[in-house]
Image: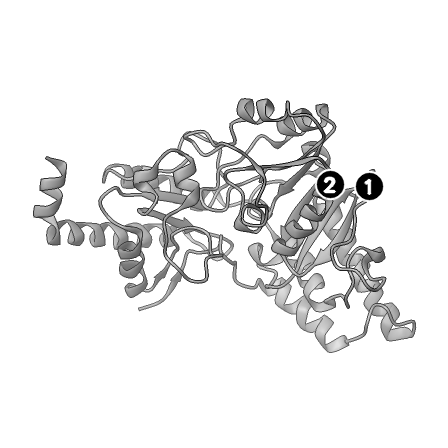
Amino acid sequence: MTPLYLDHAATSPLRPEAREALLRASDFGGNASSIHAFGRKAKLLLEEARADLLAGLNATGAAGLVFTSGGTEANAMALRQAQQFDYTVLSAGEHDSLYGAVTDAVIAPLTPQGEVDVAALEALLTCEGRPFVCVMLANNETGVINDIAAIAQIVHAHDGWLHVDAVQALGKINVDFRSLGVDSLSISAHKVGGGQGVGAFVHDRDRTPVALIRGSGQELGLRAGTENIPGVVAFAAAFKACQPMSEAVLSAQIAVERSLKMLSVTILGEDAQRVPGVLAIAQPHWPSSLQLMHMDLAGICVSSGSACSSGKVKSSRIVAAMGLDSLADKALRISGGWTTTPEDWTRFFDVWSKGYESYLRRHEKALEKELN
C-alpha cells in the first residue's frame, strides 16, 4: 500500500529546489556575523534570500523582513508590537499561536462561512484608544480567505496596526504586501516545502518594530541569534518554486467536493473564497477520530484541523466559531500541495466513501434511531 500524503496544510514535504539549496548552503558553512570571507559569503546568501522573499511578496522597498524560527515566533513578534497599543483584537479564526497567547483580547466573530465578520469587527474598533488587530489571510483549517485590504482600511481609520498571519496563504495564492496594505505579516517555510524551523516577520518600513528576542545585533537588532543560513536559503528557493495549482488538480478537488455533498457532507466555507488545495469537510454522523483512524489504516495522511495540538484529536474551535457546534468534532481537513495529483484526490474519495459506508452499516440501528 503506497502512502498518500494529503496534509500539506500541516507541513509540505521538502521541495527538490529547497533540498538542493539547503545542502549547498550547509556544505558552505559560515556565520553571517563574521567579517572574514566565509562570513561575507554567508551574509550575501542571507541577504539574497531576504531580497527574494521580499520581491515575491511585492514588498521590495516597502517592507523589512526579519527571519525567525517559524510562523509562531513571527506571530509572537507581532504581539510584542501590540504592547504599544491600547487594546488587542483577534478574529475568532486565528491560529493558536495568536489566539492562545493573548488572555485579554477582544474577539471578532466569524460568519457561518468562516470569514471574519467585517461589520462586527468595525463595531469593535469604536472602543477608545488605538487597536492592534490580528486577522489571518487564509484560515489554516478551512482555507477561507479574508478581505484583508478592506479590513486594513478600517483598522487604519482607527489609527491601529493590522497584523496578518499569511502562513497558510503563502504559496497557494498571491500574497502582495503592498496591495494588502497591512502593517505586518507572518510567513513560514515549511508550508511551501522549504523545511521546518524557519519563518519571517515582515513589517512596513514606516513602522519601527520592537525586538522580541534581544541581546545581540543580528537582523538589524530585531532578532538576536545566529541566522539559520541553510534554512533561509531553502525557504527562498521553495518560495520561488511555488506555482499555481494546475487546472487538472483543482478540477479533481472540485469533483470530489461534489461527490462528498451527495453523501450529506458539509463543505466548510463552501460559499466563501478559499485557497486551492485545502478542503475542510464534516459528516454529521462520523466523528473525526474514527475518520482519521480509517484513513490512516488505508495509508492516507489527513488531519482533523490544525496540527498545533500535540497530536491530539479534539473538537475544532474554528468550526464552533462558525456556529456549527454540532460538527466541531466531525471535521476533517484534506490538503494537497506540490506533490498532489488528480488521482490522489480520487483515491482519497474512494477510501473515505468506503469507510463511511462501512461505518453506516456497523451503526445503522443507532443512526436510524438518531435520525428518527
Disc 1, SS: loop
Q: In the rendered view, does 347 fall on the left or right side of 43?
A: left
Please name the residue that numbered disc 1 is placed on. Answer: 205
Depth check, front residue: 170 or 123: 123
Where residue 278 appears, x then y in whole percent?
Answer: 45, 45
- Badge 1 amino acid: Arg
- Label drawn at residue 127: none
Which residue lies at the image location 58% right of the left edge and 22% below the top edge? 123
Which residue lies at the image location 62% right of the left edge and 40% below the top edge? 174
Which residue lies at the image location 61% right of the left edge and 32% below the top edge? 148
Q: In the rendered view, does 34 fall on the left or right side of 99?
A: right
- Badge 2 amino acid: Asn
Quarter of the image for residue 185 reads: top right
Depth check, front residue: 85 or 261: 85
Disc 2, SS: loop
Q: Are the residues tagged 1 and 2 within 8 Å (C-beta)?
A: no
Depth check, front residue: 151 or 168: 151
> In terms of sequence position, does the residue under pointer 1 or pointer 2 come before the other?
2
Q: In the rendered view, does 119 fall on the left or right side of 59?
A: left
Within-10-Å neighbours for mark 2: few <14, some 14–19, many 20+: some
Please name the residue that numbered disc 2 is placed on. Answer: 58
**Residue at the limit of the structure toward the left, as seen here:** 365
- 151, above or below 51, in the image: above
Within-10-Å neighbours for mark 1: few <14, some 14–19, many 20+: some
- 26, above or below 185, in the image: below
Query: Mark 1 or mark 2: which is in front?
Result: 1
The answer for how far apart the CA atoms under marks 1 and 2 are is 13 Å
- 32, above or below 80, in the image: below
